[in-house]
Image (spheres, rainbow, N blue to C red):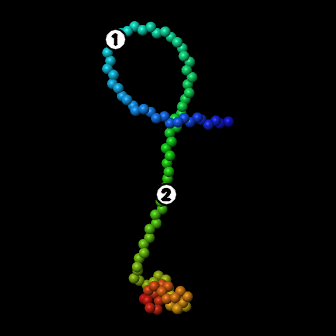
Amino acid sequence: MHCRPRVMAPIIHPTKHCCVNNYSETIVPHIHPQHTTIVNHEHFKHQHYFPQSTSVVNEVTNQHFASLGPAPFPRPRPGFGGFGGPGGPGVFPGYGPFGR
């Protein structure tokens, strides 16, 4: 069975303070008694996260041109969407019996 690790609250550290020390030398005899302490260690793994998101933008452009040449499609005929047809006059403005 896998147990979830404990997650602690974030630690906010105090402001770092730097100090310059000046030293002088004095000899002092010391006696050092000895004592043994058993230390149990617990290891903390600090995991840092850097979330990132991504966006996609699709841009579309177009242009319209007024061309002064022959029509790239057949001119409308009467009774088929042209003058007097189901679409009435002006289905293709500028073309037809009164256009170019």
Under circle 2, the secondary element is loop
Location of the N terminus (image quadrant) = top right
How far is mark 2 from mark 1, CA to CA?
A: 71 Å
- The residue indicated by pointer 1 is 26
Left or right, 4 with reference to 25 = right
The residue positioned 45% from the left and 87% from the top of the image is 95
| Residue at x-position 65% and y-position 36% | 2
List the residue tagged with mark 2. 56
Q: Earlier in the sequence, mark 2 or mark 1?
A: 1
The image shows residue 85 at horizontal and vertical percentages of 54, 90
**Residue 7 screen position, x and y as percent:** 56, 36
In the rendered view, would you say 65 is above or below 74? above
Residue at coordinates 50% horizontally, 11% vertically from top-left? Answer: 34
Q: Which mark is residue 72?
A: none
Image height check: is 90 above or below 44? below
Which part of the image, by quadrant, shows the C terminus? Answer: bottom left
Side of 4 relative to 28 (left or right):
right
7, 83: nearer the viewer: 7
